[in-house]
Image (cartoon, rainbow, N blue to C red):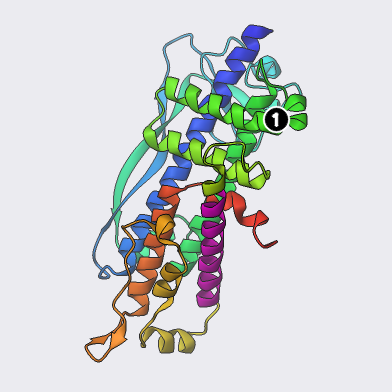
Amino acid sequence: QRMQLQERSELCMKKILRQTSELIQLTNRLESISRAVTASPGEKIKCTEIQYEKVDTPAGVYNTFCGVCLRTCHENCEYQTEIQKLQCIAMGRDGSCVVCPQSCRWDQHASSTFIIKPVEKVFFKVPDDLIKHWNENTTTYERAVLDAIDNYEKSLERLHSDICELAKISTYLTENALHHDPQGWVRYYDTLIRRAVDMAASPEQVLVLTNAKQAMILQRGLVGSDSTGSAVTYEQKVLARVFGEVKEEMIRRTNMSAQQRFEEENKPCTTYNKLLQSIPPRVRGDKLVPLPQSSSHSTGSSYKTNLAAIVKLVQELLKANPCSQVAFETVDGS
């Protein structure tokens, strides 16, 4: 039993690291969108994303493959037939897979002689093709930004769910113990971060997990349970407010008529500077600087320039604190 828990724990940990990689890729997507906004129509924009490749395994090695997620859930599984997959180590007590993002049922899995391996790919696309690459129904940069933020929030929810799943099967912390001892979550995240380092996680992945812990401190009202708790809470609230304002602005622009959009895009825009001014210096850092304002010596900054700067602002804040969206539901009741 202990060995099974340990192996299942390893599978969950790999899933958590995979989820952190997806969060990192979503911040990279915002950078590509930012460059596309001010690029010429024929200019190709560099993008990176995680894609999945099929790799054959040696003869006699069978793997558990999900027909819904199209991913490998357990490599070198001792249970080779479909009817035996309920006994696969990737299946929880309720028969659902602890590796699948949607917790797919055991009978949606099969044996395969290959694994699906995540690989980072680089590609180049012109702006119009780029914003449709992730969603063919997206036709505006504002919608592309909203899609990226929405996907980030969903991915972040899955990350916390995965961490909870790992906690359930942990040999030293149970779901019941964590429920009655909220401070245990802080210690659990610290252990999780050390484990990620031991598994050779990238610095970016460790940063995502570190900030997930800090966001959890805010969400659960555990300020004071961490040496940086007060500072983290302050920054999380600022970031949650800023991201909420960005989403509102993107939705407003998306709902504009063609005439309204034409009129707004042909006059100086100050949206970015207003957002920037609302962010305390210690939160925004040194990379984010104001755009030129309208004056007797300058025509100011166009809407496109503002939009590119806003997307860059979101990306930089996510890099500094990639789990701020956890606080969306806890700030001002929004």
Residue 72 visible in the picture: no
Residue 99: image x %, image y %?
A: 59, 28
Q: Can you say which quadrant of the picture contains the N terminus?
A: top right
Residue 259 visible in the picture: yes
How many marks the image carries: the answer is 1
State whether residue 249 is above or below residue 183.
below
The residue drawn where x is 56% and y is 43% is 229
Q: Is residue 53 left or right of residue 181?
A: left
According to the picture, the residue beneath numbered tag 1 turns out to be: 105
State whether residue 24 is above or below residue 99.
below
Q: Is residue 129 left or right of residue 259?
A: left
Residue 172: image x %, image y %?
A: 66, 16
| Main SS, magenta residues | helix
State whether residue 195 is above or below residue 272.
above
Mark 1 is surrounded, within 10 Å at the Cα level, by few (under 14), some (14 to 19) or many (20 or more) other residues, namely some
Residue 225: image x %, image y %?
A: 62, 36
Q: As drawn, which residue projects farthest toward the left?
A: 297
Residue 128: image x %, image y %?
A: 36, 66
The residue drawn where x is 43% and y is 54% is 317
Please give the range of residues in magenta. 233-254
Label 1, secondary structure: give it.
loop
Q: Is residue 296 left or right of residue 224?
A: left
State whether residue 221 is above or below residue 263.
above
Q: Which one is in front, 22 or 302?
A: 302
Q: Quadrant of residue 266?
A: bottom left
Tell me the amino acid under the disc marked 1. Answer: Arg
The residue drawn where x is 53% and y is 37% is 227
Judge whether residue 105 is colored magenta.
Answer: no
Q: Which one is in front, 250 or 293?
A: 293
Q: Which one is in front, 286 or 94?
A: 286
Q: Can you say which quadrant of the picture contains the C terminus?
A: bottom right
Judge whether residue 247 is colored magenta.
Answer: yes
